[in-house]
Amino acid sequence: MPSPQAQKKPMHWKSKLPPWMQAWYGEFLLIAQIVLILAAALLLRWMFDKVLKKLSQRYELPVEVWVGARRILNVLLGFGTLLLVLERLGVSGGVLWTAFTGFTAVAAVAFFAAWSVLTNIFCALLLLITRPFRLHDQIELMEGGDRPGLRGKVVDMNLIYVTLKETHPKGGQSQLRIPNSLFFQRSTRRWLSAPEALEYPPSSNRPANPPAAGGGSMF
């Protein structure tokens, strides 16, 4: 059993605070705990980034693997941080678990209702495994015949779409997001050098000045 003096230490410390701080002691302590949780989460995120970069450089991992692992770790870390903060705010674990399972059930129903979303997620995994192209590659999604396809520099890949950076013949740049499933419905051309901007034929039904990509490194 701790001595009475040891039990009075917290009160003794609190009694040394100014009177206006004693009334807000609990709130200050709660804010300090939340700040410490957020600071620890940021520190862990920085450490994870450093470790992933070293592993990627040492084993020459593809960029998409490193980016995917980083996103998964950030999501898990953010979810864990949110649970800890809510717990310090007084939300019970049972309530959190009920809310999480309910949200998961609703999300599962929504995903099955939107079959195209599941298709794009599955195609994203196939793109990651087969690796027909990488980040910073210049690719073109063929349309058949002599018509030019969707062309650009791959700047991002996620579970739903691939983002291409287009450079227009008359100047200016734009971004084009292509669903992942579309890469398994058409042929994909991977340029080994920077392609020249293509002008669409007058007989085509395409716009007179369509977006075309050019310049930049390969993905």
Image: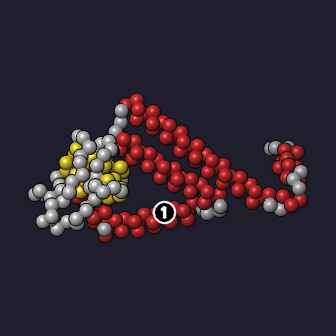
Q: Residue at x 41, y 32 (%)?
A: 57
Nearer to me, 136 or 69: 136
Q: Residue at x 56, y 57 (%)?
A: 82
Quarter containing the N terminus: top right
Q: How is the image coloured?
A: secondary structure
Return the residue at label 1: 100
Quarter containing the C terminus: top left
Nearer to me, 136 or 113: 136
Q: Kindly indicate the quadrant of the structure image that contains residue 91.
A: bottom right
Q: Residue at x 51, y 61 (%)?
A: 97
Residue type at the position of mark 1:
Phe
Q: Residue at x 24, y 57 (%)?
A: 150
Nearer to me, 105 or 192: 192
Residue 11 visible? The answer is no
Q: Position of residue 161 (x, y in %)?
A: 32, 57
Residue found farthest to the left: 145
Q: Is residue 193 left or right of residue 171?
A: left
Q: Position of residue 119 (x, y in %)?
A: 26, 60
Residue found farthest to the top: 58
Q: Is residue 2 left or right of residue 173?
A: right
Report the number of discs. Answer: 1
Residue 59 visible? The answer is yes
- Neighbour class for label 1 at 10 Å: few (<14), some, many (≥20)? few
Q: Position of residue 183 (x, y in %)?
A: 22, 54
Vertical order, 8 against 55 (above or below): below
Q: Kindly indicate the quadrant of the structure image that contains residue 147.
A: bottom left
Nearer to me, 6 or 198: 198
Q: Is residue 174 left or right of residue 141?
A: right
SS at circle 1: helix
Vertical order, 87 against 8 (above or below): below
Vertical order, 57 against 126 (above or below): above
Q: Kindly indicate the quadrant of the structure image that contains residue 67.
A: top left
